[in-house]
Image: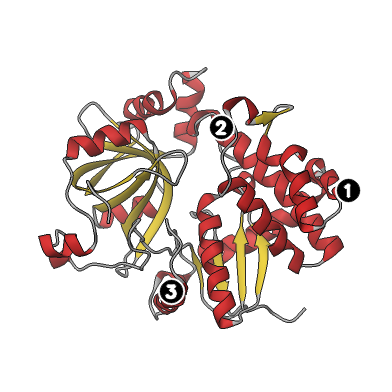
Amino acid sequence: MSEADIHFYFDPVCPFAWMTSKWVRLVQSQREYTVDWRFISLRQINAHVDYDTHFPPEYEAGHTAGLRLLRVLERTRQEHGREMVGTLYAALGARIFDSPPPTEQDRTENGFDVRGTEALVGPVLDQVGLPRTLLEALDDDGHDFTIRAETDEALALTGKDVGTPIIHFQPPEGTAFFGPVISRLPSDEDAVRLWDHVVGLAGFPGSPSSSAASVSFLSSAHSAWPTTRSASSRTGTAAAAGRRSRAAMHLDQARDFVGRNHRAVLATRTRDGGIQQSPVLVGVDADGMLIISSRETAYKTKNLRRDPWAQLCVFTDKFFGDWVIVEGVADILSLPEAMEPLVDYFRRLAGEHSNWDEYRDSLRRENRVLIRIEPRHAGPDRQG
């Protein structure tokens, strides 16, 4: 096939990739771009990670469900062509993210997250006119080599400390970037404007994308635009806050929300003044600091050592719903001082570990650090 205008790398269980894919489809319909929907597996990216140690209980099952769905998508590509990958992904995403969530008792089937089972995939195949013989691929790890190769291809474009989606515009020489993470779907007009801004910023000489680093773009729930701010504008004015629909809220309210909801996107500043984002799990310690586990070599850690400004968008497990934005100043605890605070972090987010000695050993192997953010501003307390 001739080279598509856009390579879009996705994991079908990633909510960030799903929302970004809907935006890309809006741009595609107006610009007549061609999109090649490609694979990146969160389960394979985290193959070396001890899930019991570093993730809530449902994460491994969710990432495994994503890999099982990618196997079906890969077989679909083999037998029915690349265009059907986009069609099936759209139908799967609508079923997973845009339909009422399953009840607690319906979230698993035969020990698997229901998203990666015949119960969910079968009706979706019927919907798009594909044969149910594709369900055989769910358990066929023979597809994993191709998925791994495409995952490596995606990470080679941006660096390894990212997730999904990754977008490559005008391949093979064009701009590639992680994200952007957007939390609402823009209008048709804004979709194209956002695309032009994102591609322009990612392709700017000297941007992190030019050195294969992780690039993403900050987007609050009420503004899907790439954002960079000078030091003189970090606090902002009351009028500017009103224009952004981000009224101040009490910091204790924000801490209470974070204490109950741990999924978030962390934004840090890159060396060149851009914004780098990472999906994280965040908690609150006894001193009211927001706490995040990271690695010494992670881009977010390096960014925060250079510039301590940090911003978090924290949301519920449902993704669409209540959310808060918290800005603050970060410091970083390294091992060995970070050991017991990292144990406390795990307890606050996941409870008791089955083997604390094993957990501590994994912290040392992975050279873990604890990011601590002192909240300075939070919002909104109303939405407009």
Q: Which amino acid does label 3 sit on?
A: Ala
Left or right: where 326 falls relative to 214: left
Q: Tell me if residue 50 can be seen.
A: no
Q: Which amino acid does label 2 sit on?
A: Glu
The structure residue drawn at horizontal position 56% and vertical position 49%, both measured from the top left corner, is 98
Q: How crowded is the residue under tag 2: few (<14 C-alpha within 10 Å), some, or many (20+)?
A: few
Of the pair 191 and 368, the residue shown nearer to us? 191
The numbered mark at residue 133 is: 1
* SS type, badge 3: helix
Mark 2, mark 1: which one is toward the viewer?
1
- Reading the image, the residue beneath label 2 is 58
What's the CA distance linking mark 1 and mark 3? 41 Å
* SS type, badge 2: helix
Q: What residue type is labelled 1?
A: Thr
Q: How crowded is the residue under tag 1: few (<14 C-alpha within 10 Å), some, or many (20+)?
A: few
353 above or below 158? above
Q: Please provide percent x and percent y for residue 134.
A: 84, 50
**Which quadrant of the rendered structure holds the C terminus?**
bottom left
Q: Please provide percent x and percent y for residue 199.
A: 45, 76
**Which quadrant of the rendered structure holds the N terminus?**
bottom right
